[in-house]
Amino acid sequence: MNRSRAIRPRSALAKQGWSTGSVLRIAVVVLLVCCVSAPTCVAAADQRIPQLLGRRKWAQARKVAKKMDIKDRSAFEPFFSAVAAADWPEVSNQYEGLRVRVRHLGSKDPDAMIDNAIWPAVEETYRGYRYFEDWSEEVLAIFREIVLDPLPARSILLAGSDAVRFVSTAFRDATGQPKIFIVCPGRLPDNSYVDYLRVSHGRRIDLPSELDISLTFEAYFDAVRRGRITAGSDIRLIDGKLRITGTRGIRDASRVLTKLFFDLNNKDHRFFVEEGYVIPWMYPYLAPKGPLMELHPIKVRTLPLPLVKEDRDFWSTLVARLMSDATFRDNVSARRAFAGMRAAIAGLYAHRKLYMEAGHAFREALHIDPTHHGVAYRYAEMMKRRGHRAAAAEVIETQIKRDPDNERLKAYFESLAPPAVTDP
């Protein structure tokens, strides 16, 4: 891989044609056309994709076993055999029997024969199958058309949510397209996941070494000791060593490792982000790009108005298309996935203090999925920070009406009440 530093443009958006002069001349037309050609249509082939995916992952699992000198392959072979036979009830049974032996899924007695770089291959096969079972052919076709097809070859998709990670991986590994790399930021602190990426992606991308990961954890622990990070119960002394044990700590570590991964690769690859949770360091480098955001190698000074308009037009057309599809409206996980993508862009606008656009995007996300508490919370937080506590409370109250037993929503709603006024 060429490690020399390339000369970068002054503007992070210049490569995309967003120079000062061209911005004033470009008229953006967003055309969302239906999938019509066999290579890009999922309808004719979606039933075979889980099996094709399983075949690819089976080969990866065997490659890992050989590398790790695991001669007893009885832990994972029955699972992949069931996938090859399209025996989906047995696939589910095998998966449930394996997942209870994996540490990061809560196992107190992890099995070294499966709790290693083999597990991600199993997980991506099974979860991909479940999404292809759950989502309709129409929704899968729209996902591929707008999320995956526009991505350039050799680009890196940072897939934060399960839906985008597993559906994208299934399409890529089963069909060979698009030729992209898919990385889940939240799993980067896990050595076994990074080992799996080394097997599946080889030397085509640079990955943090075990030393990189160890040093990152040490830096995190040092920051906790010095009081720069408040970790609370996330840091525990286990076997004489400090270890991260909670979700917050793992997320902090993954944010640092994602930055390291980005720095290792941004000279040779374009990055696109689907946000699973907020990674603050990214915000100055992000710009909307269809349903995703592009992570540029240098800071984006401003978001040009034509780009913002393109984003609004894109989502207006997409939302109308999605909501006109009964199979989408009736599918909770599909609505949640697309609402999350829209809310991520809303968060970018809020960070940029483009509050009108942020509010519009948050409302659009809630139109896609009115029950998405996470979107409602982010929207309410933005309004609360701007002093609009009553409007924020109204958003949360609407969520409580849909989920009246949710104590966390109720507690947050109470926190939005205006401070009591006391007599002098």
Image (spheres, helix red, strand yellow):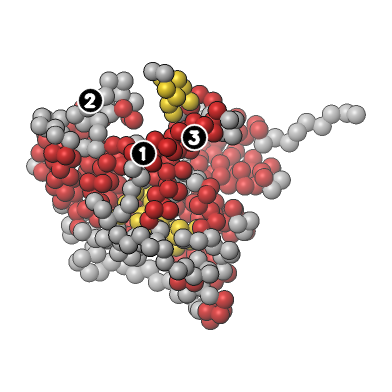
Reading the chain from its start, which is encountered first: label 1 or label 3? 1
Q: Position of residue 232 (x, y in %)?
A: 54, 25
Tell me the tag on residue 111.
2
- Disc 3 is placed on an element classified as helix
**Which residue has dot 1 on it?**
211
- How many marks overall? 3
Residue 377 found in image quarter: top right
Residue type for callout 2: Asp
Q: Position of residue 392 (x, y in %)?
A: 64, 43
Spatial separation of the CA atoms under disc 2 and disc 3: 28 Å
Residue type for callout 3: Tyr
Position of the N terminus by quadrant: bottom left
Are the residues tagged 2 and 3 within 8 Å (C-beta)? no
Are the residues tagged 2 and 1 within 8 Å (C-beta)? no
Tell me the tag on residue 220.
3
- Disc 2 is placed on an element classified as loop
Residue type for callout 1: Leu
* 145 over 28 or under it: above or below: above
Seen at 26% across and 46% down, the residue is 198
Seen at 50% across and 45% down, the residue is 278
Mark 1 surroundings within 10 Å by alpha-carbon count, few (fewer than 14), some (14 through 19), many (20 or more): few
